[in-house]
Structure formats: C-alpha cells, structure tokens
Amino acid sequence: MSSLLHITNGDSFTKRLKSLKLEGEIITWREMLCEGKTLNQVGSESFWKERYEFLHTNYKVSKSSFIEKTLKEYRSLCNHKKQDHIVLWFEYDLFCQINMLAVISWLQTHRKYAQITLVCSGNEDDTDKLYSLNELNNEQLLNLYTNRTVLTQDDIAYADYVWQLYCSDNPIRLENLTDFKNYQFTYLESAIKTHLQRFPSISNGLNLMENNILHLAKEHKPANKKEFMGTVLTNQGNFGFADLQYERAITRLKPLFSSFNPVRLTKKGKEILEKQTSYYSCIQNNEVYLGGALKYNFLYNTASDRILKL
C-alpha cells in the first residue's frame, strides 16, 4: 500500500486531483462543519449523530445519503492506517478552514505517527484575489504541492486547540486568540474573524452575511432569484459557501423580501439594513448553532470588533 494519503476539501477537487496522477490514495472530507452544532471529539458516535440531525433537519439529507457519502468516506479514512504521510488539500475560506481544523484534530488523536503536510490555496499572485484550488491550473497546483507546508507538532496542537474553542459554548475565547502568526496557517486568522462576524450585530440584529445579502438585493436589484443567487455567490468575501447554504439563509430572511421576481426588499427590510430598526422581532428559531455556541446568545459589536454575551 502507498505510504501517502491525500485528504481533499470536496468531490469536485478530488476529481481534479485524480487527473494530476500523484502518488497515493485519496479521501474526500464531505462535511460543512462551519454550519450547525459541532462536538469537539471528531468522529465519535455523538459527533456524527449531531451532524446527521443538523443536515437532515436543515438540508433534508437522508440517513442513507449521509451513510453513503459522509460516513463511508470517514470509515475509509479510519481504515487507512498505514500511510505515514498525509497531505491535506484545503482553501482560504471559512468553510474550508473549519473543516481543516476538524481533520487535523482527528489526525492528532488517531494518526500521531504521521507526517502532515498542507496544501492551501488563497493569495496566489500579486492581486488581492483569493483563489480556490479548482481555479488554479495544473502547473500552479503542482507547484503548491511541491512547496506544501510541513506542519510541526506545535502547528497540529494549535489547530486542535482552535477547534476545541470553536466547539465551545463561548466564542469570546476564540476572539481572545492573538497568536495566529506563530503558526503555519496563513488564512486561519481571517477565517476566525469571519466566523465571529456571524453572530448578530448590535446595530440591527443581522450578522455580516445576512447584511450582505440584503445589501446586494438593494444595490443590484436582481431581476430574479437565480440572478440574485449568482450575485451573492460572487460577492460573498471569504465565507466559501455554496448555493445550498445561501438558499437556506435567504429563506430565513424571507419576511424581509417583498418579491423574488424581481428581487425587492420590504419596507422593514430596508429599515433593518439602514439600522433604523432591528431584526430581533423577526427571529423564529433561537436554537441556531455556530460551532458549539448559540448564535443568538451573543452580539457582535462592529465598532469595537468585540463579542458580547447576552
């Protein structure tokens, strides 16, 4: 058996990686741990039970689909015990960085002997643009692979520590992290900052992503929902979310839209966006988790970039 194992961030890149014909076997990490409740013991029975409940309730994922796509791949990872070199392929965005932390946390517990290296795409040229792995050509990918980051034991322990904080019930502990620069995770600090901005703002009760959705609706005046989705996906910053996640977010904000064909806000939607009133009266579900913390138990102060506990 090959001594090399690749763990990728999703199916589309797995397909791409296979075409590069690199040595080693490939496992696809099929999760979106940036959404819903997470437990710190990655791979435990309670961890997967919690994840299935979230995905089933919010994304109508069936048990058979969850077993086939996620658990089978995870069990395959568990069975790959002989590889002494594990290559992680992840990207700069929040979606990928949270999954990356979870995978490293699992590896620290279950593959202590393995060398872990990281291929992480993001700022690949002199522009401000951040690139996903699939946006890079083969030469760029192979260059990243050749120059991949060898994670030290300190790096691995730090990733595990940040994961434990992400799964805790208080995001203020995450906010107090100031030592990102001491470790080899170029994009982790900005991803964690983005995560903290997912707690509702003091100014109007909406978080960064929700305010951005309303802002894009008002500014771009999309002709229909499909055009609106395209606009949101291309102007989302470093969330790294897919249309499914935005579909759910837009459905949640539905009371603030008067129409989706064309896309228009209600009077209240405009007032909330302009911070004349708050979204709090519209909240129908308080049991929304971001990692281990309840979303509506905290407020984000955009003026000071600090989290407040309610």
Image (spheres, helix red, strand yellow):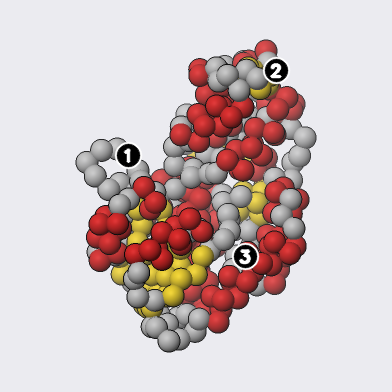
Is 272 placed above or below 152 here? above
Residue that mark 2 sits on: 258
Residue type at tag 1: Lys
Residue 64, visible in the rendered structure: yes
What residue is at 55 percent from the left and 20 percent from the top? 222
Residues tagged 1 and 2 counted as in contact (Cβ below 8 A): no
- Figure quadrant of residue 68: bottom right
Residue that mark 3 sits on: 70
Tell me the distance, in whole angstroms, between the alpha carbons under discs 3 and 1. 31 Å
Tell me the distance, in whole angstroms, between the alpha carbons under discs 3 and 2. 38 Å
Disc 1 on helix, strand or loop? loop
Which comes before the other along the chain, label 1 or label 2? 1
Which labelled disc corresponds to residue 245? none
Expressed as whole percent of the image width and height from the top left, the position of residue 67 reads: 69, 67
Q: Split into 4 quadrants, where in the image is the N terminus?
A: bottom left
- Figure quadrant of residue 62: bottom right
Expressed as whole percent of the image width and height from the top left, the position of residue 262 reads: 62, 17
265 or 152, which lies in front?
Answer: 265
Residue type at tag 2: Ser
Expressed as whole percent of the image width and height from the top left, the position of residue 230 reads: 52, 32
Residue type at tag 3: Thr
On the rendered structure, is 18 left or right of 172?
A: left
What residue is at 62 percent from the left and 43 percent from the top? 244
Judge the density around disc 1: few (<14), some (14-19), many (≥20) Cα neighbours within 10 Å. few
Which labelled disc corresponds to residue 129? 1
Disc 3 on helix, strand or loop? helix
